Image: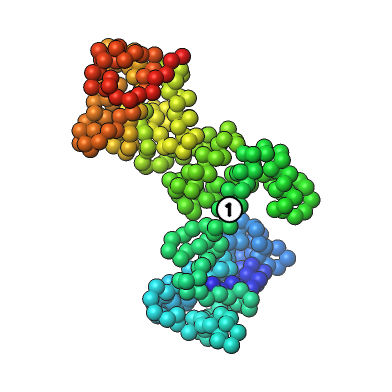
């Protein structure tokens, strides 16, 4: 059940805010000054950074009472600003909190719920009360919560269409279309199209998670339209606990191949463990590399003359670790890349890997 409080911030007037500070132990003059700072034209202004905190403090008593009411009826209660939500997993929804009027099929507040809200100085919005069962789309603060927290399908469709327009027509034309179709007002009053897309992507990530397939697919498409987005993908690869591939390479091959290879893989939505992203000054190298090998599904090994140089120790350890992982999993995990090396040369260094299907790269 969703309940909206009418004129939420304006209903918290100067007197209520001043009374709050007095109750917290502030002197009368101090309480007056603090209330004057927090209020505008005698009420809490919507959009001020202080308003959400002050309003939550004002609502503390009401929240406690509503939480107790919900608990009595085996319900859960939550509030975000003026949006109140009650939910129940099993059984009929308690009429003391809300019910459906059979005459016009409208959701009606229960007597106990209404009394608590009004006793705390608020008024339920008569046109913004909803009660849905699991067969309907259940929304809380704009998110779908039927089985898991998710964004509405319309949000995904719109974001897909925006990225497609950027890919197909370019940024300028996509921006012009957006300003004319999706927004009202004078041109220039709305944020640029590219920032709107970035914001929607960030929101999608917060709700669905960095590793969500829908989000990753949108990233692959967006980076084709906006090359600078690769920076975001690289940063997020660093926080994904599981990686698709671990790149093992000689440091001498980083500029010539590996850095570009890592960027190309990320741009395709593949999560990458690459030492440039993962290892920082002062880190435990052995521990970091072990973690990378354990959390990666596959190991891309860039075999080159540099990889087998006599003074190399870390490359041999990584190679041994991947071979050991194959032995444990009884499955192929090594994806070979031959860089400036022939099969004959590789065979002399590692006969076991020379017969595997590999990508040959020459510069």
Q: Is residue 329 visible?
A: yes
Does 275 sit above or below residue 81? above
Q: Is residue 107 above or below residue 227?
A: below
> Taking 103 as reference, is 210 left or right?
left
Above or below, 228 against 317 in this view is below
Place residue 273 in its image quadrant.
top left
Q: Which residue corresponds to the image point at 63% horizontal and 78% vertical from the top-left?
A: 126
Q: Position of residue 176 (x, y in %)?
A: 73, 44
Q: Mark 1 sits on what residue?
A: 157
Front position in the image: 263 or 96: 263
Displayed quadrant of residue 56: bottom right
Q: Nearer the viewer, residue 115 or 101?
A: 101
Element class at badge 1: helix
Q: Is residue 157 above or below residue 13?
A: above
- Front-most of residues 64 and 107: 107
Q: Is residue 61 visible?
A: no
> Where is residue 142 drawn, in percent x and y?
56, 62
In the image, taking residue 25 as reference, residue 162 lies left or right, namely: right
Residue at image location 67% in from the left, 62% down from the top: 45
Please state the total of marks drawn on the protein image: 1
Give the residue displayed 72% in from the left and 52% down from the top: 181
For this orientation, the residue located farthest to the right is 186
Q: Quadrant of residue 55?
A: bottom right
The crowding category of the residue bearing disc 1, from other C-alpha atoms within 10 Å (few below 14, some 14 to 19, many at least 20), is: few
């Amino acid at each position: 059940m969703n309940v909206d409080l009418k004129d939420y911030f304006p209903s918290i007037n100067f007197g209520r805010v001043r009374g709050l500070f007095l109750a917290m132990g502030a002197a009368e003059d101090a309480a007056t000054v603090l209330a004057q700072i927090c209020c505008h034209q005698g009420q809490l202004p919507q959009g001020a950074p202080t308003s959400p905190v002050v309003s939550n403090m004002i609502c503390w008593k009401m929240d406690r009472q509503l939480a107790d009411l919900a608990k009595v009826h085996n319900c859960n209660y939550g509030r975000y600003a003026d949006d109140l939500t009650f939910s129940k997993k099993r059984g009929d929804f308690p009429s003391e909190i809300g019910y459906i009027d059979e005459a016009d099929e409208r959701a009606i507040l229960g007597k106990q719920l209404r009394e608590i809200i009004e006793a705390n100085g608020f008024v339920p919005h008569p046109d913004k009360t909803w009660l849905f069962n699991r067969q309907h789309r259940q929304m809380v603060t704009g998110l779908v919560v039927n089985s898991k927290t998710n964004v509405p399908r319309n949000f995904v469709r719109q974001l897909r269409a925006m990225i497609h327009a950027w890919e197909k027509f370019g940024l300028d034309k996509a921006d012009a279309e957006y300003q004319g179709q999706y927004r009202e007002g004078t041109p220039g009053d709305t944020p640029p199209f590219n920032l709107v897309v970035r914001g929607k992507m960030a929101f999608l990530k917060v709700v669905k998670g960095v590793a969500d397939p829908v989000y990753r697919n949108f990233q692959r498409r967006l980076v084709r339209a906006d090359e600078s987005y690769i920076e975001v993908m690289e940063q997020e690869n660093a926080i994904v606990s599981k990686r698709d591939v671990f790149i093992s390479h000689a440091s001498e091959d980083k500029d010539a191949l590996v850095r570009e290879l890592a960027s190309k893989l990320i741009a395709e939505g593949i999560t990458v463990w690459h030492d440039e992203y993962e290892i920082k000054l002062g880190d435990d190298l052995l521990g970091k590399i072990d973690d990378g090998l354990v959390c990666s599904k596959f190991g891309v090994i860039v075999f080159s003359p540099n990889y087998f140089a006599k003074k190399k120790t870390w490359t041999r350890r990584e190679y041994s670790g991947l071979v050991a992982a194959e032995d444990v999993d009884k499955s192929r995990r090594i994806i070979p890349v031959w860089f400036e090396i022939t099969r004959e040369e590789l065979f002399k260094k590692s006969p076991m890997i020379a017969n595997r299907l590999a990508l040959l790269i020459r510069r």
